[in-house]
Image (cartoon, rainbow, N blue to C red):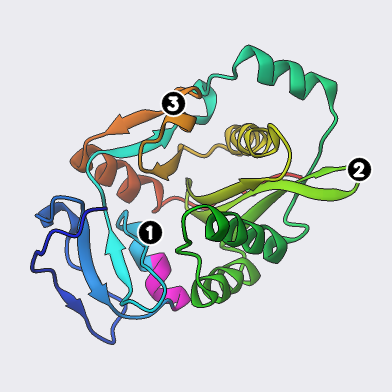
Amino acid sequence: MSGIPFAVPVLGDAPVFPDPGAGRHPDGLIAVGGDLSRERLLAGYRQGIFPWYEPGGPILWWSPDPRAVLIPEAVHVPRRLRRTLRQQRFEVTLNRDFAAVIEACAETRRFAEGTWITDEMKAAYIDLHEHGDAYSLEVRLDGRLVGGVYGVAVGRVFFAESKFHHERDASKVALIELMNRLQDAGFLFCDCQLWNPHLEQFNLRLLDRPDFLRLVRHGTREPRPELAE
């Protein structure tokens, strides 16, 4: 995200946001400030807004345009990854160790290029998990946690936040297994926030902000399905 100076609203105490459809910041910055309470985070996701900020800085809330999504039933699994999945070398579990997954995601990025998963963020998403709003998939090899992914489910929309791997293909296995569970449960799509070349191979789609927000507002109003182990 660029650091172009641009006037954006400052949030108050109430867990409400400005209309992201009216946002004019070139990178999709919608608001600054507020907190990471469960009420505010869920209110943000229902409007297609998520937090992303640097340690020591103010909380920044984003709604980029375009938005990257994966449609569970339309995900492409590359041939080599299909072979890896058939080998069943990895054990995949659901919600067995959310805290370990988010900690590993934070550590992976800290060593690579810095992390936005601050201690405050970790505590906030662990709280979401304890309330049943956030999920993790753990990937293990010979009992060791070697990969995983976590995100937030609101209605029939899943908002993927981060993934990690310590073994080749472990994060890809986590992603595909997540897509399989989302498809089986009847989720509409998985928000991946921003395009990146790693996700392109899985048939990532880019939606203009108005289309994305329309889908989010529809999908998050529906009852949340249960993900199966």
Is residue 150 rendered magenta in the image? no
Q: Which residue is mark 1?
A: 45
Q: Is residue 21 left or right of residue 55?
A: left
**Dot 2 lies on which element?**
loop
**Dot 1 lies on which element?**
helix
Q: Earlier in the sequence, mark 3 or mark 1?
A: 1
Looking at the picture, how far across and down is residue 28, in whole percent?
21, 53
How far apart are labels 3 and 1 at the CA level? 23 Å
Q: Which residues are magenta?
A: 37-42
Looking at the picture, how far across and down is residue 155, in whole percent?
47, 52
How far apart are labels 3 and 2 at the CA level? 30 Å
Q: Quadrant of residue 192?
A: top left
Looking at the picture, how far across and down is residue 56, in whole percent?
38, 79
- In the image, what residue type sits under mark 3? Glu
Q: Earlier in the sequence, mark 3 or mark 2?
A: 2
Label 3 Cα neighbours within 10 Å, binned few <14 / some 14-19 / many ≥20: few
- In the image, what residue type sits under mark 2? Asp
Name the disc covering residue 142, or none. Answer: 2
> Who's the residue at 50% across and 77% down the image?
120
Looking at the picture, how far across and down is residue 123, in whole percent?
57, 76
